[in-house]
Image (tube, rainbow, N blue to C red):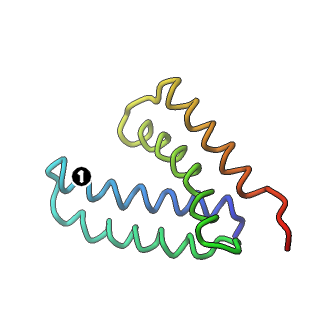
Amino acid sequence: MATSALYLAAALAEIAGCFAMWAAIRNGASGLWIAPGMLALALFAFLLTRVDAAAAGRAYAAYGGVYIAASLVWLWAVEGVRPDRFDLIGAAICLVGAAVIVAAPRAA
């Protein structure tokens, strides 16, 4: 699976897991949301281990930019709140940073 697809799948799993906890704890949804939320968070962690990176910290750092952008998509698609220009500018900056981390030439 390509790195970008793994990052996107991991972001979806992490956001879904965190949202499930948010729904149960902050929004008063049923506590039954917690179990699938925990499974989604476990899937998130597993997916990040599949990223082709020599160091975990670098994989996690690059993932951060993808997570931020995906969170704004979630904000709009699931929560119905449209990101403003500052959200979009911030996400673009983070994605550029993630791309630098992923694509930088490195000595073997």
Quadrant location, the N terminus: bottom right
Q: From the viewer's perspective, is 49 left or right of 39?
A: right
Residue 16 picture quarter: bottom left
The residue beneath circle 1 is: 23
Comparing 41 with 58, the one in front is: 58
Question: Residue drawn 29% across and 58% down?
Answer: 20
Residue 15 picture quarter: bottom left
Residue 31, horizontal then vertical, whole percent:
16, 63
- Above or below residue 32? Residue 84 is above
Residue 51, horizontal then vertical, whole percent:
65, 70
- Above or below residue 36? Residue 80 is above
Question: Residue drawn 62% across and 75% down?
Answer: 50
Quadrant location, the C terminus: bottom right
Question: Residue drawn 55% across and 34% down?
Answer: 90
Comparing 56 with 73, the one in front is: 56
Q: Residue furthest top?
A: 85
Question: Residue drawn 59% across and 58% down?
Answer: 61
Residue 2 picture quarter: bottom right
What's the residue type where badge 1 is placed? Ala
Residue 27, horizontal then vertical, whole percent:
18, 47
Residue 18, horizontal then vertical, whole percent:
34, 57
